[in-house]
Amino acid sequence: MADAVFLALSVLTIGCAIVALEIRSLIYGSIALMLTLSGIAGFFLLLDAPFVAMFQLSVYVGSIAVLILFTVMLVRRELIFNKIEDKRRRYAGIGLMIALMLTIGTIIIGSGIKTMETNSSAIDYKKIGEDFLTYYSPALIVMALILASSIVGALALAKREDVENEQRTD
Amino acid sequence: MSNGLIDFVLVSVALLAIGIYGLAVKRNAIRMLFGVEMVVNSANLNLVAFSRYIPNSQGQTLALFSIAIAAAEVAVGLALVIVAYRMYKNIDIADFRSLKG
């Protein structure tokens, strides 16, 4: 069964995920999203994967938090606090969420992984580093190229000056 | 280790359902990106949990790749939100319906 640290982490993760979607201010919402992602990093630590946990912290809580906060600050003030949504659509969404949780949850609880336990020792992160530099090195290079090209593309998209004037006519 | 695999998978399912709720209901473009983040992170949690319990190091490797790709996706998504905001002076996705090129 689950221990206390696990329960605290799951309450933090799920609660902050709900807060991130439901709170009025987008700034507080992005901070709550960062708490959710830190909770996921805590789960990675519980799963004996410190390398992935540190990667998650540095990529998500380090860079994406700053990116989202800057984007939120670029948007007009009343849009940050504005909450536009359909009542009926909202209830349908809550129904969809609960239905998804119940269906997938019952399927998983009914399946064989309920009794799955492990006695093996944790995977050494040196093994992951070795894999990255030997077997996965082409994939690593491709990933680096994708990251660089996507950052350049994002900069080129955000820097375009002509989009403002095109739409003024209609 | 007292936590079973099923605990992690159930947390991941809850996070996936919340993310899909956000994607389906919210009309704010930035909040929809929050929903995408939650779905991606629940997938990563699943990968690492299964790689711990099988045990196998490839799950962690795939999770690392997935985190990096998600970072690139968020950068491009936020740039698109900024461009759309400049065009329409709004981040409500109902206003983006005429986004036909």
Image (tube, grey):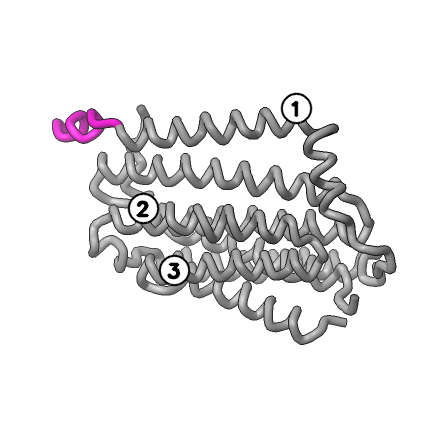
Which residue corresponds to the image point at 29% horizontal and 39% vertical from the top-left?
A: B82
Mark 1: secondary structure: helix
Residue A57 lies, in percent from the top left, at 53, 53
Q: Is residue B55 above or below residue A7?
A: above
Disc with the residue nearer the chain's start (1 vs 2): 2
Quarter in which the C terminus of chain A is drawn = top left
- The three-letter code of the residue at mark 2 reads Thr
- The three-letter code of the residue at mark 3 reads Gly
- The three-letter code of the residue at mark 1 reads Pro
The residue beneath circle 3 is: A29
Q: Nearer the viewer, residue B29 or B61?
A: B61
Which residue corresponds to the image point at 52% horizontal and 40% vertical from the top-left?
A: B70
- Mark 2 chain: A
Q: Give me the C-alpha separation between circle 3 and circle 1.
A: 38 Å
Which residue corresponds to the image point at 64% horizontal and 43% vertical from the top-left?
A: B63
Horizontal relation, residue A107 to residue B83: left or right: right
Q: Which disc is residue A138 wearing?
A: 1
Horizontal relation, residue A86 to residue B43: left or right: left
Q: Give me the C-alpha separation between circle 3 and circle 2.
A: 13 Å
- Mark 1 chain: A
Residue A65 lies, in percent from the top left, at 41, 51
* Residue A132, visible in the rendered structure: yes
The residue beneath circle 2 is: A71
Q: Give me the C-alpha separation between circle 1 and circle 2.
A: 33 Å
Which residue corresponds to the image point at 76% horizontal and 48% vertical from the top-left?
A: A124
